[in-house]
Image (cartoon, grey):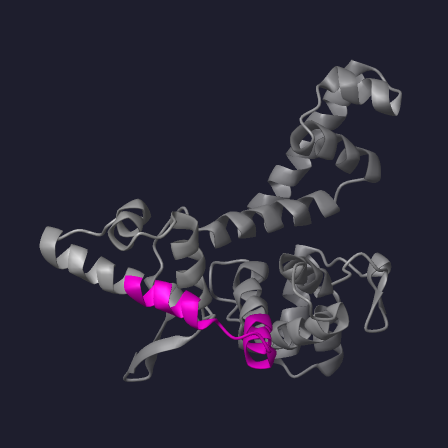
Amino acid sequence: MALNKVEICGVNTSSLPVLTPEEKEELFEKIKAGDKEARERYIKGNLRLVLSVIKRFGNSSENADDLFQIGCIGLMKAIDNFDTTLMVRFSTYAVPMIMGEIRRYLRDNSSIRVSRSLRDIAYKAIYAKENYIKKNLKEPTIAEIAEEIGVEKKMIVYALDAIQNPVSLFEPVYAEGGDTLYVMDQISDKKNKEDYWLENLSLQEAMNRLGERERHIIDMRFYEGKTQMEVAQEIGISQAQVSRLEKTALRNMRNYLRS
């Protein structure tokens, strides 16, 4: 799947607008009042979010244009259902919606079927896990399951993953008296990879608001692991200038993330 092309579905991704927090708030007020033009502006201002999400599906054989369109549907659903009184960023709310929409599409349109052998491994692993819990009153490790059924650990992980159906974090699991409990309401694991990914996404949004040179410095310092002296030599300025630019960039990023 090619995700590096400049144009997707007729949209020039290199010139997508970036909305300020003030613009987002103002547009949402207009959206709630039924302003269709404000809704279109808000959608365009968040298309970078869709692009960020579909990059996670880079190993998919699906066409990037198709995934982009499906992601846009998830984005529009997020806009229509977002509660501005929630103490969360719109991106935090929208990302699971976009991902859920894409995963449903991939699930419903996939021609891949889980092989019988993989299913057998998965069911043996589940059965072994249940027996272990009954005997020991605790969850077994993958290594313990592997030893029990005589299968490599990586094959057990692969098999269990293969039989899972993708589930949106906004999938309703219980409802009573008009109050709906969603999958995300039951998640409490602070080490969840999705949470880390959302944090990285917020950092990327903050970096997008930096100037080109500041963004390049932050990228080299914290993503490539270069020293200030190495950065200075590469871009042709002094180490002291790199230090000042780095501090300014980090301060601007912190201010954005706190806003």
Classify residue 145 as left or right of residue 4: left
**Magenta stretch?**
101-124
Quadrant in which residue 101 is drawn = bottom right
Evaluate whether residue 164 shows in this view.
no
**In the image, is residue 163 above or below residue 135?**
below
Residue lying at 33% horizontally and 63% vertically, measured from the top left: 186
Residue 221: % across, % down: 69, 27
Evaluate whether residue 88 shows in this view.
yes
**In the image, is residue 124 above or below residue 101?**
above
User: Camera-side residue: 231 or 253?
Assistant: 231
Q: Is 114 one of the magenta-colored residues?
A: yes
User: Camera-side residue: 157 or 209?
Assistant: 157
Residue 119: % across, % down: 39, 69
Residue lying at 59% horizontally and 46% vertically, measured from the top left: 200
Residue lying at 60% horizontally and 38% vertically, measured from the top left: 254
Q: Is 134 one of the magenta-colored residues?
A: no
The N terminus lies in which quarter of the figure? bottom right
Magenta: predominant secondary structure element? helix
Residue 43: % across, % down: 71, 71
Classify residue 116 as left or right of residue 33: left
